[in-house]
Structure formats: structure tokens, C-alpha cells
Image (cartoon, rainbow, N blue to C red):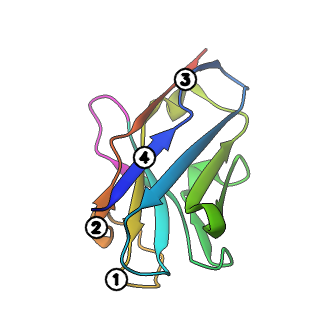
Amino acid sequence: QVEVVESGGRLVQAGGSLRLSCVASGLTRSTYVMGWFRQAPNKKREYVASIGWRGVNIGYLDSVKGRFTISRDNAKNTMYLQMNNLKPEDTAVYYCAVDEDSPILGHQEYNYRYWGQGTQVTVSS
């Protein structure tokens, strides 16, 4: 059984930093793409960042480029999202997603088969 678990979300002031973590277990393939999405209140869930198996192929939402850094540690089956210079508009539930089916960095929800329950990030002004 596949399990995807996020952690690290909390309340932080604008300009602050947070690091989110995501651990995936029970996957049947040894290589897979991982991604972060977020959903703000009354908004659709949106793509934030994704990373390929080797950590070389990486993609970001334009509004987080230069502030967020995605990385992964395959030995620990863990992905990270380092978020710096946080803004109130970054407030959202952040979800981790896993794609075992394609090496392409998908930007859409349907690209990912497995999802975590989300972790709340709140940025106060």
C-alpha cells in the first residue's frame, strides 16, 4: 500500500522560511517523479514544483522561482521544499504527489497518481 505523508507546515511571518518534507512508501517502482501542489482557500489546487528521479530535472511555478527550492533524498524516499521569503499569498495547504508512470515532470494533477493529505502553511503579514 502506497503512503505519502507531508510535514513541516505551520504559521510563519512574511519574509520567513519553512521546509516541507514528504515521505513516500510502498511504491512499486524504484524511479518516480515527485511534485508539490498547493490549494489556497476558495482556489483551485495549483502546481508548485516537481523533480525527477535523479534530481536534475526540476520545474517551478513562476511565482515561486528564486524563493522555493525542491530537492529529494532517494535513500530516504523523501522530497523537500525549502521555502524562503514567504509571502501571504503563499498561504495554502501544500500537497505532495508522486508519479510512477512517466519520467516527464507533469504540471497537472492528473499526472500524479498518489497524493498526501496535505500540510497547512500560513503566512501572516
Q: Earlier in the sequence, mark 1 or mark 3?
A: 3
Q: Tell me what residue is drawn at x 73 percent, y 26 percent.
A: 15
Residue that mark 4 sits on: 5
Residue that mark 3 sits on: 10
Q: Earlier in the sequence, mark 4 or mark 3?
A: 4
For the residues marked 2 and 3, what is the alpha-carbon distance in whole angstroms? 26 Å
Displayed quadrant of residue 10: top right
Rendered view: 30 above or below 3: below
Residue that mark 2 sits on: 113
Residue that mark 1 sits on: 101
Q: Amino acid at mark 1?
A: Asp
Q: Earlier in the sequence, mark 4 or mark 2?
A: 4
Residue 44 image position (x, y, % from top left): 28, 44
Residue 87 image position (x, y, % from top left): 61, 29
The segment highlighted magenta reads 40-46
For the residues marked 4 and 1, what is the alpha-carbon distance in whole angstroms? 20 Å
